[in-house]
Amino acid sequence: MRSAPVRSQIIDYLLSHGASKVADISDGIASWRGAVRCHLAGLENASIVRSNISPGARGRLTAFYGITPGKTGSDS
């Protein structure tokens, strides 16, 4: 699966830096923000990461993504 290396990089970044914005993750792993958002959505659907914003929230909120408690990079 082609997305696995990018998702692993995101997980590694979050494990070492803590909860972060998409822009910071994108810069940290040298990947496009749109790609990072897409992979974060997949990781969030798999309950590996979570954001601080409730699903369906409206407005200009900045989401911070972090590893779901109890999850590690080996869970992916």
Image: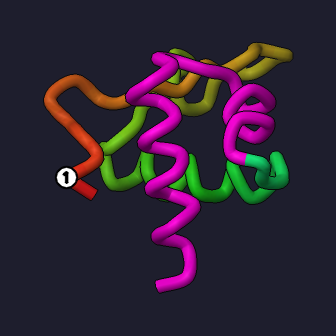
Image: 37 above or below 70:
below
Residue 76 located left or right of residue 59 = left
Residue 41 located left or right of residue 49 = right
Where is residue 18? Give x, y as percent. 46, 17
Which picture quadrant has residue 3? bottom right
| Magenta-drawn stretch, dominant element (helix, strand or loop) | helix
> Helix, strand, or loop for circle 1?
helix
Q: Is residue 48 magenta?
A: no
Image: 14 above or below 40:
above
Q: On the image, numbered disc 1 is attached to which residue?
A: 75
Colouring chosen for the image of the structure = rainbow
Q: Nearer the viewer, residue 23 or 37?
A: 23
Amino acid type at circle 1 is: Asp
Seen at 70% across and 35% down, the residue is 28
Q: Nearer the viewer, residue 43 or 10?
A: 10
Seen at 84% across and 53% down, the residue is 32
Residue 31 located left or right of residue 5 = right
Where is residue 33? Give x, y as percent. 82, 46
Q: Is residue 8 magenta?
A: yes
Seen at 76% across and 14% down, the residue is 61
Badge 1: few (under 14), some or many (20 or more) residues near its Cα, within 10 Å? few
Q: Across the whole image, how many numbered discs are drawn on residues?
A: 1
| Magenta segment | 1-29
Q: Residue furthest bottom?
A: 1
Q: Residue furthest left?
A: 70
